[in-house]
């Protein structure tokens, strides 16, 4: 929310159809066929008068972000990575944000909203954790992350498997909790007369459904345990998976050796999974390897550089893919990330320089990099060497 704008003024900036969506998400009671002004007044009144109620209808990720902003204080910016999808409160502009810096965004909470939610936010988070609602949400997001897109009946089948493994609530209690979850409000969509659930990381879920037609040999959905779903759905909005596998352990060690830690490490792990989704055979997307190419000036030999790239490719190939109904590229034997550098060419074209670590002759920005990596010069050595 921009400084000086009240909650009422923010809501007034939306179209009536958008206000209806906000009302449905938060569960505010508004008379049928209410005029826009009445809708704005009712929504603003609801936000001010019943914070414990509407906070309880939000995603865990949004609540923890809100708690961080409340703890920082009103109008105090918190600097965050750009996520794959924004928080609900950012979307409806109840939080202030500045995206002028391409490397990170700043987010803050107005004094009005701070004073409304501060007495309730931590108790709402405690309630979500202790009731099992957050764990259920992690499982739901995990299944969506593993499959990308799935039919609503299949989603409910997987969630019943999760319930059967925990039974923290009775089945009616669990069903009510699931139906009231913001996951269903935010992730459900219609396609060709059927209802589907899509991962919030996917901007165009219909393209996943159409893309699967190219891989019709993968007809069934891979089986995942509830524990794997929780692993995949924890840490929103930056999801990671498979770090306990041999390939995942090598990746973590390699990224740590390159200097990644904390949130930066998680972000790189997450980006590899997301960027690996659309890779075709012999056509690895450059973005998958950004964690290595951005650190190439710190890698002192091509042997080490290629080893790092191989570790990323091996990890990407064991991750679940949306187009393959959760199967990995290795399992389905397609959509693999493959690196096949020409070692003779590398040896002939590259010489060591003690000051730069690696010396590569300059080239046109969009021509292949002379180092032989297969990337354009602009996205490879052209980034750091002249």
Image (cartoon, rainbow, N blue to C red):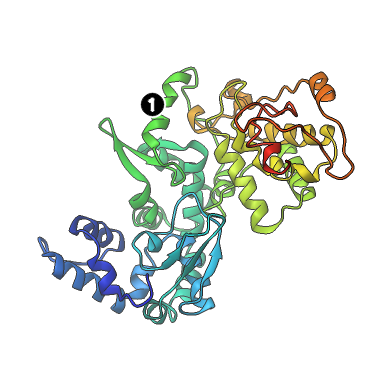
Please give the residue where the numbered disc 1 appears in the rendered image: 210
Quarter of image, res 302: top right
Quarter of image, res 116: bottom left
Which is more toward the observer, 166 or 317?
Answer: 317
> Which quadrant: the C terminus?
top right
Q: How many marks?
A: 1
> Which quadrant: the N terminus?
bottom left
Q: Is residue 369 above or below residue 90?
A: above
Q: Is residue 152 above or below residue 38?
A: above
Which is more toward the observer, 18 or 225?
Answer: 18
Q: Is residue 74 above or below residue 271?
A: below
Q: Position of residue 306 (x, y in %)?
A: 78, 32
For numbered disc 1, what is the local secondary structure?
A: helix
Residue at 35% across, 75% down: 51
Which is more toward the observer, 121 or 109?
Answer: 109
Q: Position of residue 329 (x, y in %)?
A: 60, 26
Pick out the residue farthest to the right.
354
Q: Is residue 162 left or right of residue 181?
A: right
Q: Position of residue 148 (x, y in %)?
A: 46, 38
Please tell me how crowded label 1 is: few (under 14), some (14-19), or many (20+) other residues with Cα within 10 Å: few
Residue at 35% across, 64% down: 93
Q: Is residue 111 left or right of residue 278?
A: left
Q: Position of residue 371 (x, y in %)?
A: 75, 29
Which is more toward the observer, 359 or 146?
Answer: 359
């Amino acid at each position: 929310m921009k400084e000086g704008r009240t909650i009422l003024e923010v809501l007034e900036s939306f179209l009536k159809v958008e206000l209806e969506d906000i009302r449905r998400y938060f569960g505010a009671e508004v008379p049928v066929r209410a005029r826009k002004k009445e809708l704005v007044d009712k929504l603003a009144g609801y936000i001010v008068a019943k914070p414990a109620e509407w906070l309880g209808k939000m995603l865990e990720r949004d609540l923890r972000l809100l708690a961080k902003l409340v703890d920082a204080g009103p109008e105090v910016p918190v600097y965050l990575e750009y996520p794959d999808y924004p928080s609900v409160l950012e979307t409806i502009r109840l939080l202030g944000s500045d995206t002028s810096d391409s490397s990170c965004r700043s987010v803050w909470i107005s004094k009005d909203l701070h004073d409304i939610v501060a007495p309730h936010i931590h108790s709402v988070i405690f309630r979500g954790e202790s009731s099992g609602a957050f764990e259920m949400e992690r499982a739901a997001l995990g299944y969506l992350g593993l499959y990308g897109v799935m039919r609503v009946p299949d989603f409910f089948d997987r969630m019943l498997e999760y319930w059967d493994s925990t039974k923290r609530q009775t089945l009616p209690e669990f069903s009510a909790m699931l139906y009231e979850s913001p996951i269903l409000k935010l992730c459900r969509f219609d396609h060709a007369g059927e209802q589907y659930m899509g991962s919030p990381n996917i901007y165009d879920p219909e393209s996943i459904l159409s893309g699967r037609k190219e891989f019709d040999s993968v007809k069934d959905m891979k089986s995942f345990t509830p524990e794997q779903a929780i692993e995949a759905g924890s840490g929103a909005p930056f999801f990671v998976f498979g770090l306990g596998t041999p390939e995942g352990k090598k990746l973590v060690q390699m990224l740590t050796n390159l200097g990644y830690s904390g949130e930066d490490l998680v972000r790189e792990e997450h980006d590899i999974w997301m960027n690996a989704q659309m890779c075709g055979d012999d056509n690895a997307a450059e973005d998958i390897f950004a964690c290595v190419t951005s650190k190439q000036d710190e890698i002192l030999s091509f042997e080490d550089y290629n080893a790092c790239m191989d570790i990323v490719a091996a990890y990407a190939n064991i991750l679940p893919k949306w187009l393959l109904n959760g199967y990995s590229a290795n399992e389905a034997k397609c959509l693999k990330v493959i690196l096949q550098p020409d070692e003779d060419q590398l040896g002939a074209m590259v010489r060591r320089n003690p000051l730069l670590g690696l010396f590569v002759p300059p080239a046109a920005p969009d021509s292949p990099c002379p180092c032989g990596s297969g990337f354009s010069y602009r996205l490879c050595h052209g980034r750091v060497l002249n």
